[in-house]
Image (tube, grey):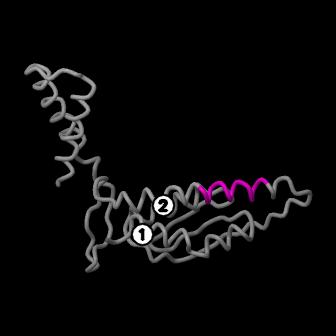
Amino acid sequence: MKPTAVIFLMSLGFWFVFSGELDALHVGFGVVSAALVTFLTRDLAWIGTRLDRTGRPVPVYTFSIRWGHFLAYLPWLLWQIVLANLQIAWVIMHPRLPIAPALVRFRTTLVGDVARTTLGNSITLTPGTITVDVEGDEFVVHALTREAARGVLGRAMEERVARAVGPA
């Protein structure tokens, strides 16, 4: 289904839910409003590109992400954020403040804007690491501790992002 059709149907559905009226006047207003919203937001549904199974770039719309895989990724990411918070709290509370800041460079196998952006944002959301730069397939990440640097280079997050929003 085309993204514009999805936006129209969702907007119309919201109209019906919130208006609570199904007479001709309200249905007409709903159709006109949903069409206007669809027209005004038609370019917002496009969020980037990814490669298909043959290696060709294809557009990615908000409605073409594999939401089941992405929703399975979120609890794992939240758990990683909790663990990283605990590690950083331990570092801060430790009398010697055992930090070992480092810039870590690595190349990703992820392709497409959506997958790389998701990886970069996930790294930054995890305390103790921040994505400093992304140039093509190379990431530069600042890690506060050796454990954080090893975690970035361990590629577990990259593999999970690939399953969530990588090539279909």
Q: Which amino acid does label 2 sit on?
A: Tyr
| Residue 56 tag number | none
Q: Report the front residue among 55 and 27.
A: 27
Amino acid type at circle 1 is: Arg
- Where 3 falls versus 144 (above or below)? above
Which residue does the image show at 40% across and 62% down from the upper left? Answer: 69
Q: Residues within 10 Å of mark 2 (few under 14, many from 20)?
A: some
Q: Where is residue 88 in the image (x, y as percent from the top left)?
A: 75, 56
In the displayed structure image, the side of residue 47 where residue 42 appears, left or right: left
Give how far across and how far down residue 25 sits, in percent: 10, 19
Left or right of 27 in this view: 89: right
- Picture residue at 58% right of the left edge, 57% below the top: 124
Q: Which residue lies furthest to the right in this view?
A: 95
On the image, numbered disc 1 is attached to which residue? 163
Residue displayed at 22% across by 43% down: 7
Magenta residues, start to end = 79-89
